[in-house]
Image: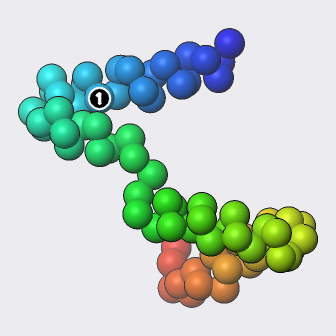
Amino acid sequence: MAAAALLLATTQYLPQVVLQNLSHSAASAGLMLSPGVAAIIMMFVVGFLSSKVPPKYLIAIAPSWRILHMPLDQSL
């Protein structure tokens, strides 16, 4: 039930809030829900690589990549 409420909130109510309260256009409110260009490109790359490389290695690479490229002077 919580997943359904979260899905409804992000796809239905969030663009309406952006339209009414933040005065954005309908196009920019709709683009707010898009995953981004990099994510769309990576979907194709990972889809191609998953037929060549075992998925467990692809799953292990993503967190490792983020950890290696994290700034060292960042405070939590």
Q: Is residue 73 above or below residue 48?
A: below
Residue 16 visible in the shown view: yes
Going by the numbered disc 1, the residue's amino acid type is Pro
Q: Quadrant of residue 33?
A: top left
Q: Is residue 37 left or right of residue 59?
A: left
Q: Position of residue 9 (x, y in %)?
A: 45, 22
Element marked by disc 1: helix
Q: Is residue 70 above or below residue 59?
A: below
Q: Is residue 39 left or right of residue 37?
A: right
Q: Is residue 50 left or right of residue 35?
A: right
The residue that appears at 67% across and 80% down in the rendered structure is 65
Q: Position of residue 29 (x, y in %)?
A: 24, 37
Instruction: Count residues near mark 1 (Cα–Cα under 10 Å), then give few for <14, some for 14-19, many for 20+.
Output: many
Q: Quadrant of residue 61?
A: bottom right
| Quadrant of the frame with the C terminus | bottom right
Q: Is residue 65 left or right of residue 22?
A: right
Q: Nearer the viewer, residue 37 or 5?
A: 37
Q: Is residue 52 above or below residue 26?
A: below
| Quadrant of the frame with the N terminus | top right
Q: Nearer the viewer, residue 46 or 1?
A: 46
The residue that appears at 28% across and 37% down in the rendered structure is 30
Q: Position of residue 5 (x, y in %)?
A: 56, 16
The residue that appears at 17% across and 28% down in the rendered structure is 19
Q: Is residue 70 above or below residue 41?
A: below
**Residue projecting furthest to the top:** 1
Residue hosting label 1: 15
Q: Position of residue 16 (x, y in %)?
A: 26, 22
The residue that appears at 70% across and 70% down in the rendered structure is 48
Q: Nearer the viewer, residue 60 or 66?
A: 60
Q: Quadrant of residue 50?
A: bottom right
Q: How many marks?
A: 1
